Image: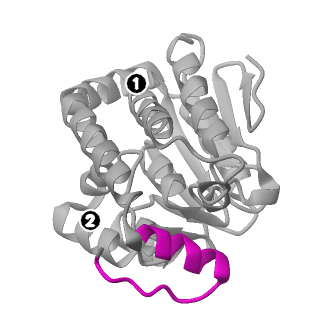
Amino acid sequence: MAYETIRLEREGRMASVVLNRPNAMNAMNDVMMKELAEAFEELKDDREVQLVIIRGGGRAFSAGGDIKQMTDPDNPMDIRNVMADVSRLAEALYTLPQITIAAISGASAGLGFSMALACDVILAEESSKLAMNFIGIGLVPDGAGHFFLKERIGVPKAKQLIWTGEVMQAEKAKALGLIDEIVPDGKAAKHAGSMAGQLLQTPIAAMIASKGILHTAKLEELRQILRLESDAQQAMRQTADHLEGITAFIEKRKPIFKGE
């Protein structure tokens, strides 16, 4: 299948999903969200591929949702369709019958961070900036961000990161358990490729089977959280605080929230 905003590349038993809007720091517009869901669903049916690397083209993994499209009257996001694709994306990624590696360079924020957290192994370059920063525009995490944060660091710490929207350096993210390994700047893709080569020389079928057992046991919880996130996000998109958040972002000023 041909894609507009991503690349899906296969090489033997390995595949790469590359976010390909480098001029927008791989911000996810509605087309990219749909294409990512379709690519992960395509990989679910590929029994030859055993390992998938996810990375961003250019200088960022992903800056998150495309705020410019959120405010574009000529090309508005249909929030219902978008949330359906985001839920498809998250469930397909979580249930992939392959080992997944996120190779983070630059920013991994919002939905981009949710997607990275869904991966089995997360590598990040030293100067990476990572954030579950939906709160800055009056939204809740989506892409199962609540689920993946909770799985990695537990509910109390997950709430704090969601509520503050803190932008973390790789060192702090690793100390919290949000990423698995820090690599030198400019080396994430290369290191992920080396790791992939090593994993493909192990009994990786057994690893995939264990992943399937652990993830299947959590699948209904994931689906429930995706439904809750979808409902909450559609409600938050109608709030005055969300409008103020995205307006302040575009105007490059501090937002004034009123809890409305």
Q: Quadrant of the C terminus?
A: bottom left
The disc placed on residue 78 is none
Secondary structure, mark 2, is helix
In the image, is residue 252 part of the stretch drawn in magenta?
Answer: yes
Report how far apart the C-alphas of labels 2 and 1 lie in the structure: 27 Å
Horizontal and vertical percent position of residue 233 = 36, 52
Secondary structure, mark 1, is helix
The residue depicted at 82 percent of the width and 58 percent of the height is 23
Q: Quadrant of the N terminus?
A: top right
Front residue of 47 and 144:
144
Q: Which residue is tagged 2?
A: 158
Say if residue 133 shows up in the picture. Answer: no
Q: Amino acid at mark 2?
A: Ala
Query: Residue 123 occupies which quadrant of the picture?
Result: bottom right
Mark 2 nearby-residue class (10 Å; few <14, some 14–19, many ≥20): some
Horizontal relation, residue 54 to residue 158: left or right? right
Q: Which residue is tagged 1?
A: 208
From the image, state whether disc 2 or disc 1 is nearer to you. 2
Q: Earlier in the sequence, mark 2 or mark 1?
A: 2
Horizontal and vertical percent position of residue 92 = 44, 27
Q: Residue furthest front?
A: 73
Magenta residues span: 242-259
